[in-house]
């Protein structure tokens, strides 16, 4: 908004890191990695609770602030695993930083093409760093930049990429394309460049991993007004503009803010609740599309023992195989990390050497498109003057397990000759656990009420624009945050302001 000369104010709950932890993080950021003391690392990077079902929650610097929910937004869930963020910067505080645009194929049911989104993908990269390598993924997933740095490869990543390259024609014949993981990480030697400390999944003290919170803090220093400590309840529009009704988490009082236009980027659950309440859709189930999340390990015959310097995704695998699904499937390959080590320790029999296994172990995380996945239903069950209550339940799609099993089988057949062996262990997570959800008010949707226009405006609104994934026509298997930002940029630049 400021980029196009429009004044903007933000209303947000903005739960934040505790003051004493902020101080500890700042102290650590002023030191070289080699000078960090063990007690400092244990204090700032406590490991999350893990099990054979994966990570229950991944905190940032040991804090759960990204997941705290104010009493004014009450949620009951059934058959799903959902997370909501009212933290300053949202779930961007704890995301895995994987970024990939939607392909032309993934946008085929959208009312716009990749060429329409391309300028906005480029605009996003003006403020978000990208680590990438030119590779075969560019054909369907453009880089949109020639100005990027690349994180260094560890020996295991280099070994696997070379193995894949040796048989890339065979992989391609089975609909598998691969390349280096693209990440919103500063790989330069600058002030915020990655220092390879190995604690990426617990929080980056050097701010190398892009975090919306850091961007907001930078914008605040430049004069951006953020009304912190408010939960937005609903919106009322008239000829003069839009009234934003919000409740203070400090004193519980209800306040009104007034704006010419409102842009909803509260996260798809909160945005859906705000719109449902504003349209008085009480006790009305609203479908939310979701990307099914699953993971499985694989082993290599060659042992690679190396220091843990970096723990985000290393390799992307993209699958387009009509025998499995007409939709694209996205896989992310991860190497060693403390989280994986803790999981392995919980699973391995005592007579097997943990180190021997870990030096050969990798994790593949997979994501399906919403067409192949379980769905969610959100229902606004109560709208009090100062709070809202919603129920969210998961609705199973039997096809999801079928597609996932076929995907693992394809990977096993394709990689086993390379000495890369996926075992038969497979974990499918409940709907909502992928964090890749949306589509409650899709652009150009068929339903008169449960849809929005090309500018993200839901029914009966002219100056309210959804700019998060709640307006997505579908949720693709590939990463979601980059496309949320690009589509928001497109909407804002397409609007005529008075």
Image: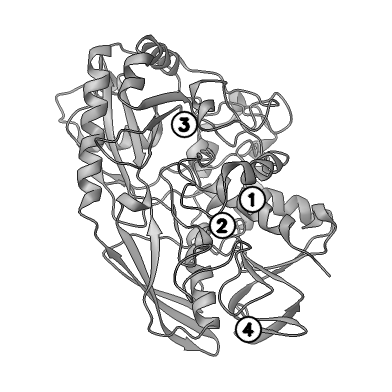
Circle 2 packing at 10 Å, graded few (<14), some (14-19), many (20+), is many
- Given residues 422 and 116, the one toward you in this image is 116
Is disc 1 placed on a helix, strand or loop?
Answer: helix
Residue at 52% in and 63% down: 444
Residues under numbered marks 1 and 4 in contact, where contact means CB atoms less than 8 Å apart: no
- Of label 2 and label 3, which has the lower sequence position? 2
Q: Is residue 287 left or right of residue 93?
A: left
Circle 4 packing at 10 Å, graded few (<14), some (14-19), many (20+), is few
Q: Residue furthest bottom?
A: 385
Q: Which mark is residue 212?
A: 1
Quadrant housing the C terminus: bottom right
Q: Which mark is residue 311?
A: 3
Nearer the observer: mark 3 or 4; the answer is 3
- Of label 1 and label 4, which has the lower sequence position? 1
> Mark 1 to mark 4: distance in Å?
27 Å
Q: Position of residue 259 (x, y in %)?
A: 75, 76
Q: Which residue is mark 2?
A: 90
Q: Position of residue 421 (x, y in %)?
A: 23, 21
| Vertical position of residue 299 compared to residue 435: above or below | above
Residue at 63% in and 77% down: 461
> Mark 2 to mark 1: distance in Å?
8 Å
Q: Which residue is mark 4?
A: 251
Is disc 2 placed on a helix, strand or loop?
Answer: helix
Q: Is residue 4 visible?
A: yes
């Amino acid at each position: 908004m400021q980029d196009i000369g429009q004044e903007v104010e933000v209303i947000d709950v903005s739960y934040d890191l505790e003051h004493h932890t902020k101080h500890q993080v700042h102290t650590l950021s002023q030191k070289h990695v080699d000078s960090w003391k063990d007690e400092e690392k244990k204090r700032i990077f406590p490991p999350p609770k893990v099990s054979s079902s994966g990570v229950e929650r991944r905190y940032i610097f040991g804090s759960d602030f990204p997941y705290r929910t104010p009493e004014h937004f009450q949620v009951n869930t059934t058959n799903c695993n959902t997370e909501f963020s009212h933290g300053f910067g949202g779930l961007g505080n704890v995301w895995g930083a994987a970024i990939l645009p939607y392909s032309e194929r993934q946008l085929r049911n959208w009312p716009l093409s990749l060429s329409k989104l391309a300028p906005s993908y480029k605009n996003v990269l003006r403020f978000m760093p990208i680590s990438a390598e030119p590779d075969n993924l560019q054909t369907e997933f453009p880089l949109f930049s020639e100005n990027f740095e690349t994180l260094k490869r560890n020996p295991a990543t280099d070994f696997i990429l070379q193995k894949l390259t040796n048989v890339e024609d065979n992989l391609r014949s089975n609909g598998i394309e691969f390349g280096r993981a693209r990440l919103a990480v500063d790989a330069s030697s600058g002030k915020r460049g990655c220092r390879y400390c190995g604690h990426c999944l617990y929080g980056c003290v050097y701010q190398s991993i892009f975090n919306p919170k850091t961007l907001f803090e930078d914008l605040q220093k430049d004069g951006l007004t953020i009304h912190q400590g408010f939960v937005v309840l609903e919106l009322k529009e008239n000829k003069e503009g839009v009234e934003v009704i919000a409740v203070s988490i400090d004193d519980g009082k209800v306040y009104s803010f007034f704006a010419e236009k409102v842009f909803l980027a509260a996260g798809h659950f909160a945005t859906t609740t705000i719109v449902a309440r504003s349209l008085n859709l009480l006790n009305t189930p609203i479908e939310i599309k979701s990307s099914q999340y699953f993971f499985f390990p694989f082993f290599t015959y060659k042992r690679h023992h190396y220091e843990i310097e970096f723990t985000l995704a290393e390799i992307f695998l993209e699958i387009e195989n009509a025998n499995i699904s007409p939709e694209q499937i996205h896989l992310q390959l991860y190497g060693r990390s403390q989280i994986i080590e803790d999981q392995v320790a919980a699973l391995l029999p005592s007579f097997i050497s943990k180190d021997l296994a870990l030096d050969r172990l990798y994790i593949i995380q997979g994501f399906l498109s919403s067409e192949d996945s379980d769905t969610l239903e959100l229902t606004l069950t109560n709208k009090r003057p100062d709070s809202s209550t919603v129920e969210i339940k998961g609705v199973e799609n039997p096809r999801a397990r079928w597609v996932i099993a076929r995907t693992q089988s394809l990977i096993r057949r394709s990689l086993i000759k390379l000495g890369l062996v996926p075992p038969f262990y497979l974990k499918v997570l409940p709907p909502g656990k992928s964090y890749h959800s949306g589509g409650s008010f899709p652009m150009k949707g068929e339903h008169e009420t449960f849809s929005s226009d090309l500018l993200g405006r839901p029914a009966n609104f002219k100056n309210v624009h959804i700019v998060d994934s709640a307006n997505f026509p579908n949720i693709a298997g590939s990463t979601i945050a980059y496309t949320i930002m690009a589509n928001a940029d497109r909407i804002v630049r397409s609007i005529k302001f008075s």
